[in-house]
Image (cartoon, rainbow, N blue to C red):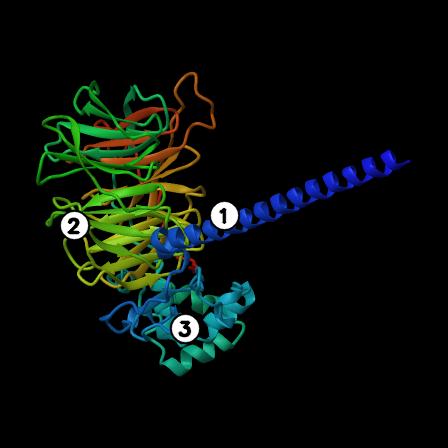
């Protein structure tokens, strides 16, 4: 009996000792977890503040120190002002300004409803005749063309008579038809035909650039390579490797023997073409870099990224001169020009921004598009540009981005635009179609849907980039079937063999 009691007491002591050890271990483990958790939170906080504050907590910027007053041609546009914004900062368009991270939604921007057809019609009828004419003029080629072709229907009636006619039910349609201008006859352009198909890439071809001497051109691809091709023969001259993901943008300098590239690996590279190697990297983007462009007169490079910013780089020092913040989604395209505004960006937040390069701030935001803006094209001679989206192609006037007209009919996601000095605008889409437009009138004079390369799927027929060479006689297209297609004007075509299928129809009102 005594032995049993002794054994029991020994077991009890051992059990208590093991329990104390277990409790100490559990307590130390809990403390360790708490310390690790606190350390992890601290590290994440430092990382977010250091690396991602620009995009995760974007301030409401007071943008646009100097913006001209809204011209009379923009009277029909609505304006939206963000809370706390400088009242001189210009936001124009027909769609509410999109809210971004850290920006409070207001009653105006929280929910945007398009007006009904009846509401639009009744509002148009209530407008005075001069305002109605302004509205119609936005869908035509230019104000001058409209005045030349509109006739004197409106000028023959004083304003009170015109309004009474509009309200008079029976004569409403005839009055509108008499007042509406006709589209001016478009300029004849020869049709374009497929001239050459170049193969060599092993992935989607995403970007194109032509060198200033017009001897060769460059392509960037999803196979992570950059290839240089002879423009005359289409033969491969050189392959450059170094990117570790899709190459989304390439640009050739006309001031130095440099090639610049950017890609989904967040890298921006400068290649010395005398040695065919990378000599500079530009570090700073936090996500994939989607487009790149060189300023034509000063040594700066502009890139745009999925991190919702565009960045201005000094080519020589690699310094990040400006980080252009304000977009609330991927910035898909960027273009530079020598005149003000010197930088234009288009974004997946459906807006276009024109930037003051010196101040690094937005001059104006254009909100007319409803869908992502994926491409921009600047006219080589006129002070105008075009933007491409899934809803429409739109033309704009610099410097403040006054709306000119819609080019409707390319019902697909527009990935790329190009325009030449003859006024031929080319749009390439995700479904493999290419549309040719007369820039002045917006007349669609040709549609191309080239067959995919043998062995490719029909779904691999997207057009990702197109570019005119420097002679503007060849059009180079980068496609999803891994090929590069070169188009030329048909030399045998005449205005009689390929007439313009145009009738002087009454322009219809377009809602933009």
Q: Which mark is residue 36?
A: 1
Report whether 102 appears left or right of 71: right
Q: Position of residue 40 (x, y in %)?
A: 47, 49
User: For the residues marked 1 and 3, what is the alpha-carbon distance in whole angstroms?
Assistant: 41 Å
Residues packed near mark 3 inside 10 Å, few (<14), some (14 to 19) or many (20 plus)? some
Q: Which mark is residue 381?
A: 2
- The tag earlier along the polypeptide, 3 or 2, is 3
Kindly indicate whether the residue at mark 3 contacts the one at mark 1 (C-beta within 8 angstroms). no
Residues packed near mark 2 inside 10 Å, few (<14), some (14 to 19) or many (20 plus)? few
Q: Callout 1: helix, strand or loop?
A: helix
- The tag earlier along the polypeptide, 1 or 3, is 1
User: For the residues marked 1 and 2, what is the alpha-carbon distance in whole angstroms?
Assistant: 62 Å
Q: Considering the image in quadrants, where does the C terminus appear?
A: bottom left
Residue furthest right in the image? 1
Report whether 65 appears left or right of 137: left
In front of the other: 203 or 197: 203
What residue is drawn where x is 15% and y is 57%? 339
Question: Which residue is under mark 3?
Answer: 83
User: For the residues marked 3 and 2, what is the alpha-carbon distance in whole angstroms?
Assistant: 38 Å
What residue is drawn where x is 53% and y is 65%? 111
Quarter holding residue 20: top right
């Amino acid at each position: 009996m005594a032995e049993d009691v002794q054994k029991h007491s020994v077991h009890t002591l051992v059990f208590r000792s093991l329990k104390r050890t277990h409790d100490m271990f559990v307590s130390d483990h809990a403390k360790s977890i708490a310390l690790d958790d606190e350390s992890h939170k601290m590290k994440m906080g430092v990382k977010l503040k250091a690396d991602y504050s620009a995009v995760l907590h974007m301030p409401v910027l007071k943008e646009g120190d100097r913006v001209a007053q809204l011209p009379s041609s923009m009277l029909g546009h609505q304006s939206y002002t963000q809370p706390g914004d400088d009242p001189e900062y210009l936001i124009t368009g027909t769609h509410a300004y999109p809210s971004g991270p850290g920006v409070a939604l207001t009653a105006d921007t929280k929910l945007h409803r398009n007006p009904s057809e009846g509401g639009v019609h009744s509002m148009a009828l209530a407008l005075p005749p001069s305002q109605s004419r302004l509205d119609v003029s936005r869908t035509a080629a230019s104000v001058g063309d409209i005045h030349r072709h509109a006739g004197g229907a409106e000028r023959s009636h004083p304003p009170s008579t015109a309004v009474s006619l509009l309200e008079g039910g029976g004569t409403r349609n005839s009055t509108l038809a008499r007042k509406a201008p006709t589209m001016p006859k478009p300029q004849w352009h020869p049709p374009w035909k497929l001239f050459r198909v170049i193969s060599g890439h092993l992935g989607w071809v995403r970007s194109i650039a032509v060198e200033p001497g017009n001897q060769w051109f460059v392509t960037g691809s999803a196979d992570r390579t950059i290839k240089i091709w002879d423009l005359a023969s289409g033969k491969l001259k050189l392959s450059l490797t170094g990117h570790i993901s899709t190459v989304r943008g390439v640009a050739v300098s006309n001031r130095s023997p440099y090639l610049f590239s950017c890609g989904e690996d967040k890298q921006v590279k400068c290649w010395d073409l005398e040695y065919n190697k990378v000599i500079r990297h530009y570090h700073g983007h936090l996500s994939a870099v989607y487009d790149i462009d060189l300023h034509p007169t000063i040594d700066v490079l502009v890139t745009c990224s999925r991190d919702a910013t565009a960045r201005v780089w000094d080519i020589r020092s690699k310094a990040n001169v400006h980080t252009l913040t304000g977009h609330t989604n991927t910035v898909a395209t960027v273009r530079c020009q020598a005149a003000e505004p010197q930088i234009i960006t288009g974004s997946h937040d459906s807006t276009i921004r024109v930037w003051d390069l010196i101040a690094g701030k937005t001059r104006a935001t254009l909100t007319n598009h409803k869908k992502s803006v994926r491409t921009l094209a600047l006219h080589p001679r006129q002070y105008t540009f075009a933007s491409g989206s899934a809803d429409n192609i739109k033309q704009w006037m610099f410097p403040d981005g006054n709306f000119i007209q819609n080019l409707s009919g390319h019902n697909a996601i527009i990935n790329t635009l190009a325009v030449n000095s003859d006024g031929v605008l080319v749009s390439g889409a995700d479904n493999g179609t290419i549309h040719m437009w007369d820039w002045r009138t917006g007349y669609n004079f040709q549609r191309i849907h080239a067959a995919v390369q043998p062995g490719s799927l029909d779904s691999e027929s997207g057009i990702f980039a197109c570019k005119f060479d420097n002679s503007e006689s060849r059009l180079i297209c980068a496609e999803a079937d891994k090929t590069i297609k070169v188009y030329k004007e048909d030399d045998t075509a005449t205005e009689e063999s390929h007439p313009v299928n145009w009738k002087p129809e009454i322009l219809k009102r377009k809602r933009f």
